[in-house]
Amino acid sequence: MFGNINTVFSAFIIVVCLIFSWFLLTTDILKPQMVGTKRTIFVVILLIYAAYRGFRLYKDFKASRHEKD
């Protein structure tokens, strides 16, 4: 699974997006620059991007597993 650099990079980006969105929701990080709706929209965008990358990672993993069989 981790033989391909794209797989490792995708997994890393998913983790970073999830952690950063969690920090934005639970802490005051970037509070002066991002307030209210802008902050919420940014968190939603990060979560959608993480979901998209996760879907692509799953699809590629499933295709590579099917290819081996």
Image: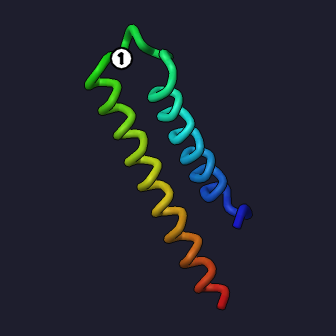
Residue at the extreme front: 26
Q: Is residue 22 left or right of residue 11?
A: left
Q: Position of residue 26 (x, y in %)?
A: 49, 26
Name which quarter of the figure residue 4 lies in: bottom right
Coloring scheme used: rainbow
Residue at the extreme bottom: 69
Residue drawn at x 66%, y 86% is 68
Depicted 38 relative to depicted 61: above or below:
above
Q: Position of residue 58 (x, y in %)?
A: 53, 67
Total number of numbered discs in the rendering: 1
Residue type marked 1? Met
Residue drawn at x 63%, y 80% is 65
- Is the C terminus in the top left, top right, bottom left or bottom right quadrant? bottom right
Q: Position of residue 33 (x, y in %)?
A: 37, 12
Residue at the extreme right: 3
Q: Position of residue 50 (x, y in %)?
A: 46, 48
| Mark 1 burial class by Cα count in 10 Å: few <14, some 14-19, many 20+ | some
Depicted 67 relative to depicted 62: above or below:
below
Q: Is residue 21 left or right of residue 1?
A: left
Residue drawn at x 72%, y 62% is 2
Give the structural element (helix, strand or loop) at label 1: loop
| Mark 1, residue position | 34
Asked whether 22 or 64 is in front, the reply is: 22
Asked whether 6 or 29 is in front, the reply is: 29
Asked whether 51 or 35 is in front, the reply is: 35
Depicted 35 relative to depicted 16: above or below:
above
- Is the N terminus in the top left, top right, bottom left or bottom right quadrant? bottom right
Residue drawn at x 57%, y 52% is 10
Residue at the extreme left: 37
